[in-house]
Image (cartoon, rainbow, N blue to C red):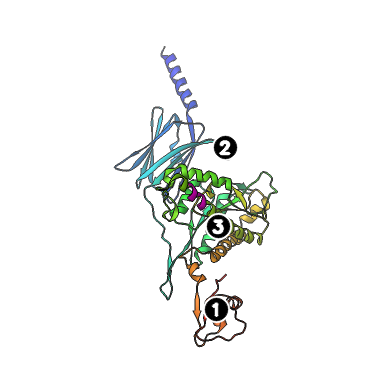
Amino acid sequence: MQKSIAIISILWLWTSCVMAVEVNNIRMWAAPDNTRLVFDLTAKIHHTVFILENPDRVVVNLENVHFNPILLKHLRYKKTVLKNIRYGKDNQHTRLVLDLNQTVRPKSFLLLPNKSHIYYRLVIDLYKQGGKKVIRKTYTDAKQYRSKDIIVAIDAGHGGEDPGAIGKGKIKEKNVVLKIAKLVAKRINSEKGMQAILIRKGDYYIRLRDRNALARKYNADIFVSIHADAFRDWRARGSSVFILSRKGASSETARWLAQKENNSDMAGGFNLDDKSDFLRETLLDLSMTASIKTSNDVASRVLNGLKKIGKVHKNHVERAGFVVLKSPDIPALLVETGFISNPSEARKLNTSYYQNKLAYAIFKGIKEYFRKYPPLGTYFAQLRHQQHIVVSGDTLLKIARKYQVSLTALRKANNIKGDMLRVGKVLHIPVAR
């Protein structure tokens, strides 16, 4: 009898182990506003997540899971909201206690296996409470004229758990586009009157809708998302520039009208709360139309720059319903820098030389547009109305050098044929290119 009981007990334990879901790996990423934990699982699981205070902790209960605590050894907590992760086992439950260094708001969800990931993935995001507001730099000239920066939100696609497309030699899209995004930002920040905001600064993932929200939070004048394309035919190559399709714009207008929280979330304090349904729809449609027009104008200039450094996939700006382009109040474009699925193009995309060329083409297109159509109150708007009063000793060449414009442009702007200048004459200073 005792022997039978022992055999049954052993069989029960063996069956329990066989049926238990394995945790194969744990990964962690630190983003500016959250820390993400990802658990690779051999099957679906039931789990619960809740908060404990004094001290701040997040408790994660995993049902019927076989967990090896050695997986916690390689985790690094620097720059995360975590101090430590503790482990415990109770019957069929595995409990993880996340010791925190600040208050967080947790969110969890399960991802199914796909072509890139053979495991189920449990994702736990720990969002920081509060956040910083970005303030535009201002400039003051001799006349005490104050102006604000043009804010350019640069979004490097994918990140963290999402590598994007993977090319020959395991070149990952998320890494390539982050390097290009940082180079674009560097050029923008070196230009007086412009300021770049990197939506993603490191190897972590940001939800697509949150990328738009961050651009809005920073009062961005334009949003540029950078990607590297992939296609089943490895011969496909060339860069592309996309803006929002009209169909995508219509669906986004409907979404904004349906979600009350959007009504007071427009950049610049454009609040729709007190408007009738018809007026709200009309205002949103007008805003979206203006946004798409600006997007197209900027995208055309960026595409022209890309044509000068390599092959483009299409000779015109393309239109699509990408989620990151769906913002009714911020012009947005998506740049596919090339096909990472093409071995030759992947190699180029992975070189600092070509990344710099791409970054300059994107920067130049953005700058050209805002030099011609500067937002009111910006430094670029000030330049468009700059004047110089000729004093004794002035020459055309001296004035051109002072304002960093060409002599030809200065002559043309003021209809000057010779070299003689009259003291007291007011010269219009053209916008420097």
Q: Which residues are magenta?
A: 281-287
In the image, residue 292 above or below residue 69: below
Residue type of the residue flagged with mark 2: Asn
Residue type of the residue flagged with mark 1: Arg
Q: Is residue 100 visible in this depiction of the protein?
A: yes
User: Residue lying farthest right?
Assistant: 235
Q: Nearer the viewer, mark 2 or mark 3?
A: 3
Residue type of the residue flagged with mark 3: Thr
Residue 166 on image: x %, y %: 60, 47
> In which image quadrant can residue 75 be found?
top left
Residue 401 on image: x %, y %: 55, 78
Task: Quarter of the image for the N terminus: give it.
Answer: top left
The secondary element bearing badge 2 is classed as loop
Q: Nearer the viewer, mark 3 or mark 1?
A: 3
> In which image quadrant can residue 58 be found?
top left
Alpha carbons under labels 2 and 1: distance apart = 59 Å
Are the two marked residues, 3 and 1, in contact with CB atoms closer than 8 angstroms? Answer: no
Looking at the rendered structure, which numbered label has been put on residue 294? 3
Task: Quarter of the image for the C terminus: give it.
Answer: bottom right
Looking at the rendered structure, which numbered label has been put on residue 401? 1
In the image, residue 283 lies in the stretch drawn in magenta = yes
Residue identified by numbered label 2: 114
133 lies left or right of 174: left
User: Residue lying farthest left?
Assistant: 54
